[in-house]
Structure formats: C-alpha cells, structure tokens
Image (cartoon, rainbow, N blue to C red):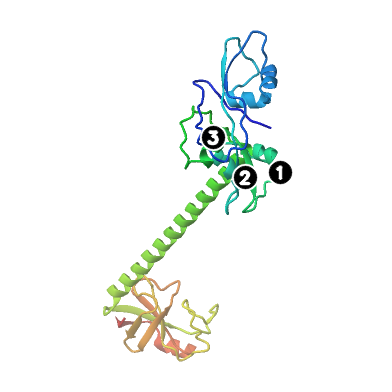
C-alpha cells in the first residue's frame, strides 16, 4: 500500500539526490472539483481515504470545491534493525506508526531482531535514511499522532525514571541521616571524654525479676558474671564509653535502664547480696574515652 503525504501550502520538492528509493508515486497539485468526494480522489490517486485524511489532518470526509491538495512523492527505503531498536522507536524515527510498519512488512507481532530489514514508505523516512545525500528542503508535514502503544511505552518510561529518582533521593536522605547521627555521637563522645562528675549510683544483677540478663548493647551478663558494666543515660554518657567509677573500678557503659536518667548510674554486680551491700551512694566518675 502506498502512502501519500498532503500538506496545506506549497508543493514539497524532493531532491533527485535521494538514495535507496525503490518506487515513487504521483506528485503534483490537485484542485477539488464540484462533485468530487474523498473516495473518488483516493481512487484516482491510488491511496486510501484514511491516508488522505491522515496526510491532510482531516477530521471528516468533507471537502469543498476549489480546495487545493498538494501531492508529494513517496519513497520506499529499507531500514536494517540495529541493537536496541523497537518498532515504536523505528516509527518515531521515520514519522510513521507501528501499525503501518507491520502492514508494509506483513508482520504479526511487535518483535524485531538485529539484522532484519523493513520497508518504510514515507518521504520523511527517505530523507532521514539518506541524510548524507544532498536533499532539498521539503514542505513541513503534520506531526504524526502518537499511537496508544507509543503513549503507554512513554508513560512507562517516565514512571520508571520517576521511581528511580525517588529511590535515589530516599537513599541520599537516609545516608545523610546516618552521617548526621554518627557525627552527633562522635561529638557527644568527644565532649564526654575526660569529663568528671558526681553521680548517684545503685547496683543491679542479671538475675533480678524481669531481667533478661542481656544489656542494651548485647552483653550477656549471665555468661559473664565478672564483667564490669554500668547502666547510663546515653545523653549524658555515650554507650560504649570507658568510665572509671570510684569504689568500683573501670567499667564499660554498656546498658541502660528506665530509671537511669541524668547524673545517675547502675553498676552491675554478680549477686543480690553484693547489690544490697552497694546500696545507694554518691560517687565520682570519670569518662576515660
């Protein structure tokens, strides 16, 4: 099936320098006569009514006497499929539709493979295919409307790009939060290092009612009854700090407690009797590092 492109304006003049052209159709200007119909004109020029309507951007089959239609030459060229090509991308490149490519080449599916060759029947396609040859400027043509498939593919690409940008933004935000938290912890440790203070100290064991025996940082006190550990308020003494406690020795701030707030600590001892002996007292502590 040959496709003719009609434009409202001067006749499109195509250079004789085109290469790869296999056939050409009628070219010239036709003036609508009284009694003409779109069907009659299509029959006389060996094109379809739909092609006439598409080429002239007509929304109906109504035409009027003295209306001038310009007929431009149609070239047939061969496109060789490259890696990454799709029928949609080929159609976009040449200004034709997927359905037209399939009709011209007897295709029943949208699958294409590198090395396949397809016939393209459009003057715009011939110009694109032979860009290296000297070509005269042609009259502007009406832009081909996107097919439903092309619109769906474009929407899918835009959605995928949007989701990728959102994922990257979320990852960057999370990385920034983690970096800020790390910097804050480092600053807190630097501020606490070498600091001495007087705190209220109580004692606890791993066998108390409701106790799991595992500290907030994962130390199993039941398996390590001689471990020197204290529970602290992390906003005062950062977890992981080494602390010297008067009357107790060097310990690690490895635990927290619901009642341990502000300048208060809880020292770990191995038995209930040791906890009772410790009692509640004011002691001086020094954060070592």
Instruction: Identify the secondary structure beneath mark 2.
Output: helix
Quadrant where the C terminus sits is bottom left
Which of the two residues, 15 or 123, is positioned nearer the viewer here?
Answer: 15
Residue 169 drawn above or below residue 47: below
Q: Residue at x 57, y 28 (%)?
A: 73
- Dot label at residue 107: 1
Quadrant where the N terminus sits is top right
Q: Residue at x 52, y 89 (%)?
A: 223
In this view, the mark in front (3 or 2): 3
Say which residue label 2 marks. 87
Percent x, y of residue 22: 62, 37
Query: Could you give the CA–CA distance between mark 3 and mark 2, rounded to whole angstroms?
Result: 16 Å
Which of the two residues, 261 or 42, is positioned nearer the viewer here?
Answer: 42
* Callout 1 touching callout 2 (CB < 8 Å): yes
Percent x, y of residue 43: 70, 21
Asked which quadrant contains residue 151, the reply is top right
- Dot label at residue 124: 3
Mark 3 burial class by Cα count in 10 Å: few <14, some 14-19, many 20+: some
């Amino acid at each position: 099936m040959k496709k003719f492109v009609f434009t409202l304006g001067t006749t499109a003049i195509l250079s004789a320098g085109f290469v790869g052209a296999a056939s050409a159709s009628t070219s010239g200007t036709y003036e609508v006569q009284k009694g003409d119909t779109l069907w009659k004109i299509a029959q006389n020029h060996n094109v379809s009514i739909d092609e006439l309507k598409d080429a002239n951007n007509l929304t109906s089959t109504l035409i009027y006497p003295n209306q001038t239609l310009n007929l431009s030459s149609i070239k047939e060229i061969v496109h060789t499929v490259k890696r990454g090509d799709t029928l949609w991308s080929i159609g976009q490149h040449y200004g034709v539709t997927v359905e037209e490519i399939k009709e011209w080449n007897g295709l029943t599916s949208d699958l294409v493979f590198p090395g396949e060759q397809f016939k393209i029947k459009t003057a715009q396609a011939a110009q694109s295919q032979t860009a290296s040859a000297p070509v005269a400027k042609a009259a502007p043509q009406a832009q081909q409307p996107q097919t439903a498939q092309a619109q769906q593919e474009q929407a899918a690409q835009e959605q995928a790009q949007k989701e990728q940008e959102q994922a990257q933004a979320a990852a960057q935000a999370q990385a920034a939060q983690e970096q800020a938290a790390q910097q804050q912890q480092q600053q807190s440790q630097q501020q606490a290092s070498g600091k001495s203070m007087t705190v209220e100290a109580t004692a606890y064991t791993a066998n108390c009612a409701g106790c799991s025996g595992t500290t907030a940082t994962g130390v199993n006190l039941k398996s390590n009854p001689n471990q020197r550990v204290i529970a602290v308020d992390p906003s005062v003494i950062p977890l992981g700090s080494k602390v010297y406690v008067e009357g107790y020795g060097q310990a690690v701030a490895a635990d927290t407690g619901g009642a341990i707030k502000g300048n208060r600590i809880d020292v770990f001892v191995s038995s209930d009797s040791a906890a009772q002996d410790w009692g509640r007292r004011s002691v001086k502590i020094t954060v070592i590092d």
